[in-house]
């Protein structure tokens, strides 16, 4: 996620450098033709610029709003994951019958294992949504035997939640938690499952390709026609105005493309790895640990 650095802001324009070079050559070519052959005598109507620009602006506005809606929903889901992860650990520590109000007393091993497993789930979900290997993040959080069992699963975060549910049932069967407590903890697991499903829905629901291609094609059509609508102005303003308007439309289109897939590990995406590390730190502090991992700090204005 971009945190405000000007370097990350201009990164959008870097992705358009090849387009900018081609458009610059094209616009300069039209300006040269205007100088040589006086294109203004053909009296190109201004409507060839104004009408397409208005129509494309409306389409871009709709696409950007839809893309931002997907991005914002992803951020809301991960905000819920942060809250429910903390809630899960707090409920385990408070509701388990052997829990003590004394902060100096060590946390029960089973409760600690289930709490740390929640942190592992966050890392696994992050890697799953990004299409990455989750196991490097799980080392040191889960036992080797549990990691080996997870290697047979296609959906690792879902398998981790299943294990959480099984251990929760063991606590209830051993009468270490009451029925009401069991129900509340199960509700927390359900909310985590719903958040995971919401993230997977966003990732697997592709933004309509035909709509995206149509908008992009219209923008390039506008870029081609734009210099002809400005042949009545001197060459220097023609080149400057054509470049500025073309790059502006292309930049908005590119930003919308970035926002529509918030889990592809690009600068504008949800900082799932950073949030997962924050959750791990919070959980370890709740367990009374003092040796904590370092927070993941933004790099060049980008939180990953």
Image (spheres, rainbow, N blue to C red):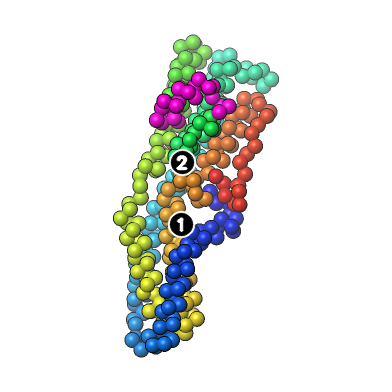
Rendered view: 37 above or below 84: below
Q: Is residue 9 visible?
A: yes
Say whether residue 131 is magenta: no
Please state if 55 lies on the left or on the right of 191 as rendered.
left
> Which residue is denoted by mark 2 in the rendering?
130
Residue at image location 45% in from the left, 17% down from the top = 169
Rendered view: 224 above or below 233: above
The residue at the far left in this view is 210
Please state if 271 lies on the left or on the right of 242 as rendered.
right
Question: For the residues marked 1 and 2, what is the alpha-carbon distance in whole angstroms?
Answer: 19 Å
* Near-viewer residue (22 or 154): 22
Q: Which residues are magenta?
A: 139-159
Say whether residue 154 is magenta: yes
Q: Is residue 77 visible?
A: no
Which mark's residue is nearer the viewer, 1 or 2?
2
Crowd tier of the residue under label 1, counting other residues whose Cα lies within 10 Å: few below 14, some 14–19, many 20 or above: some
Q: In the image, which disc is placed on residue 255? A: 1
Where residue 45 sits in the image (x, y, percent)? 34, 81
């Amino acid at each position: 996620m971009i945190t405000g650095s000007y370097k990350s802001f201009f990164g959008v324009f870097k992705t358009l450098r090849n387009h900018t070079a081609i458009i610059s050559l094209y616009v300069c070519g039209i300006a040269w033709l205007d100088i040589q052959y006086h294109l203004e005598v053909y009296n190109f109507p201004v409507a060839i610029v104004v009408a397409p620009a208005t129509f494309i602006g409306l389409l871009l506005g709709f696409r950007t709003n839809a893309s931002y809606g997907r991005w914002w929903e992803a951020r809301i889901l991960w905000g819920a994951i942060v809250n429910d992860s903390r809630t899960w650990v707090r409920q385990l520590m408070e509701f388990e019958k052997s829990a003590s109000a004394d902060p100096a007393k060590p946390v029960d091993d089973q409760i600690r294992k289930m709490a740390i497993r929640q942190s592992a789930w966050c890392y696994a979900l992050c890697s799953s949504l990004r299409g990455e290997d989750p196991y490097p993040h799980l080392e040191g959080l889960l036992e080797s035997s549990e990691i080996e069992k997870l290697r047979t699963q296609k959906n690792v975060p879902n398998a981790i939640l299943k294990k959480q549910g099984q251990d929760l049932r063991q606590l209830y069967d051993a009468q270490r938690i009451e029925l009401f407590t069991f129900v509340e903890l199960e509700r927390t697991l359900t909310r985590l499952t719903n958040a995971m499903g919401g993230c997977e829905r966003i990732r697997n629901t592709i933004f309509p390709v035909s709509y995206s291609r149509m908008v992009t094609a219209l923008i390039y059509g506008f870029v081609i026609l734009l210099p002809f609508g400005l042949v009545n102005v001197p060459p220097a303003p023609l080149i400057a105005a054509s470049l500025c308007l073309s790059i502006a439309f292309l930049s908005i289109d590119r930003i919308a493309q970035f926002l529509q897939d918030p889990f592809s590990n690009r600068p504008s995406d949800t900082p799932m790895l950073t949030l997962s590390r924050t959750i791990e730190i919070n959980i370890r502090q709740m367990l009374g640990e003092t040796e904590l991992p370092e927070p993941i700090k933004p790099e060049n204005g980008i939180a990953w």
